[in-house]
Image: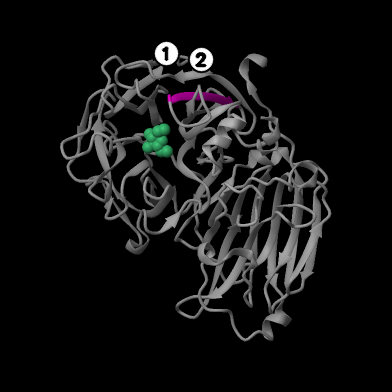
Amino acid sequence: NAMLSWQRTAFHFQPEKNWMNDPNGPLFHMGWYHLFYQYNPDSAIWGNITWGHAVSRDLIHWLYLPFAMVADKWFDINGVWTGSATILPDGKIVILYTGDTDDLVQVQNLAYPANLSDPLLLDWIKYPGNPVMVPPPGIGKKDFRDPTTAWLAPGGKKWLVTLGSKVNKTGIALVYETTDFKRYELLDGLLHAVPQTGMWECVDFYPVSTVEGNGLDTSDNGPGTKHVLKASLDDNKRDYYALGTYDPYKNTWTPDNPELDVGIGLCLDYGKFYASKTFYDQKQQRRILWGWIGETDSEATDLMKGWASVQTIPRNVVFDKKTGTNILQWPVEEVEKLRLNNATELDNVKLEPGSIVPLDIGSATQLDIIASFEVDSETLEATVEADAGYNCTTSGGSAGRGKLGPFGLLVFADESLSELTPVYFYISKGIDGSAETHFCSDESRSSEAPDVGKLVYGSTVPVLEGEKLSARLLVDHSIVESFGQGGRTVITSRVYPTKAINAAARLFFFNNATRVSIIASAKIWHMKSADIRPFSHL
Ligand code: DQQ
């Protein structure tokens, strides 16, 4: 439907049509990045799940390839579900994925490229001995899915792989051992378990360096490493992670802070984001994360427009050496190639309490924004103290005024401000009395369409002594990915403007605090569209 075509993104990955969900098996091979994804060839709603396939030289421009795998064997006839790739030391590639069988049992299957010397990896062979793992005793046949990339056990001969499940309401990660990827042994004990978190989907498990700036291959586990454990919670459709220590002899993982364990602590992204997966990019020694941005409009609307879902811009993931308590996510540097030359620079714009300042950049549908905000010291001195307690999600959004917030940017705003999506900071007083900064994205006035999600998303963001508040925003027609404080807190909003579209979309600074002025600066680039098209049109 051409009426809704403005919602399509210009530099995020999405198929030409139909439904997409989880990113699958990302890998780099012979000069090409490969992305597979859960895809319905027949409709804009979930079903008939196959593995879509696309390749890129730079993670930004993509060529759609034929499907890598379709549901055509008894062990995956009801769906070729989520899985991961492992690159073996000899360069061979193996994929483990979940199949939904003819009996609706979730099993794990092995697949490999028919021709490793094909840079496009067009043909995939499903191992005839599949399935290679079936639900073990005590595990529900519908609670056993999404194997991770494998890593090497100490000694370098045995491989380990983890996957998510649940027992009653406890979310768990099972560990299997293999030497040949065909025969597996379930290990005693669990990698980890957290009560009351429900089914763990799309578990991800990888090391991060606490000393170097580069990413680590999945098998690395030397001194100066921590391990990230991530689970996508089926019950509340969010991706939670925690930092911790992996014991490769016991095959257990222990969180650094039990109060911020997986599923009860930090989210990778506080917005519309799910089923993410990382891979190690051996070309550039970095770990890259993909996440699925779903829709919050109705299925009827998705069927009418003929497509659903987008992938995030791939994000570089590192440990935050400054805080020591979180990871940092940042759009891969390749996205900067899309920046047009004439950036707009605004330096030290004073935003009085209650002000809205238009930024004269023309149409604001495709942007990369780097902004910083400082509380004006004179007005701060006159302010008694911050209001106690704040929570983005229950705050009432950017219309709710406090002494020290909200302030930030209005994206997808029309001239008359009848539609707007504020991305903002809010400083409040935490329980211990010290200042606490919140980073939020407010969809409550983002669309005049009645049947779309309009939540206020966000969380706290660590701000260290001497740091300005800073945000990076990637704005793309109906998506804004917002990175607070260098990527300590990230929020993706999927919005459906009806007026703030095309040439009518505007950008503003705003300060809705009652007591303080804000000194705002920004550098704003218009973004070119990425080249994303079928391979045959090359
Ligand atoms: N999506 C896949 C499952 C996974 C879920 C099916 C997460 O394998 O658990 O499309 O979105």
Q: Which mark is residue 118?
A: 2
* C-alpha separation, residue under disc 1 versus residue under disc 2: 9 Å
User: Circle 1 is placed at which residue position?
Assistant: 114
Residue 531 higher or lower than 228, as above or below: above
Which residue is nearer to you in this view: 269 or 176?
269
**Residue 93, located in which quarter of the rendered image?**
top left
**Segment tinted magenta in the rendering:** 48-56
Residue shown at 37%/15% (left/top)? 72
The answer to whether residue 87 is seen in the rendering is no
Question: Few, some or many C-alpha atoms within 10 Å of disc 2 (few <14, some 14-19, many ≥20)?
Answer: few
Residue shown at 36%/45% (left/top)? 221
Q: Secondary structure at mark 1?
A: loop
User: How many numbered marks have been drawn onto this rendered protein structure?
Assistant: 2
| Amino acid type for the residue under numbered disc 1 | Ala
Picture quadrant of ligand 1: top left
Q: Which mark is residue 348?
A: none
**Residue 485, located in which quarter of the rendered image?**
bottom right
Residue 118 higher or lower than 38, as above or below: above
Residue 51 is covered by the magenta coloring:
yes
Quadrant including the C terminus: top right
| CB within 8 Å, label 1 to label 2 | yes
Which residue is nearer to you in this view: 163 or 51?
51
Residue 404 is covered by the magenta coloring:
no
The answer to whether residue 497 is seen in the rendering is yes
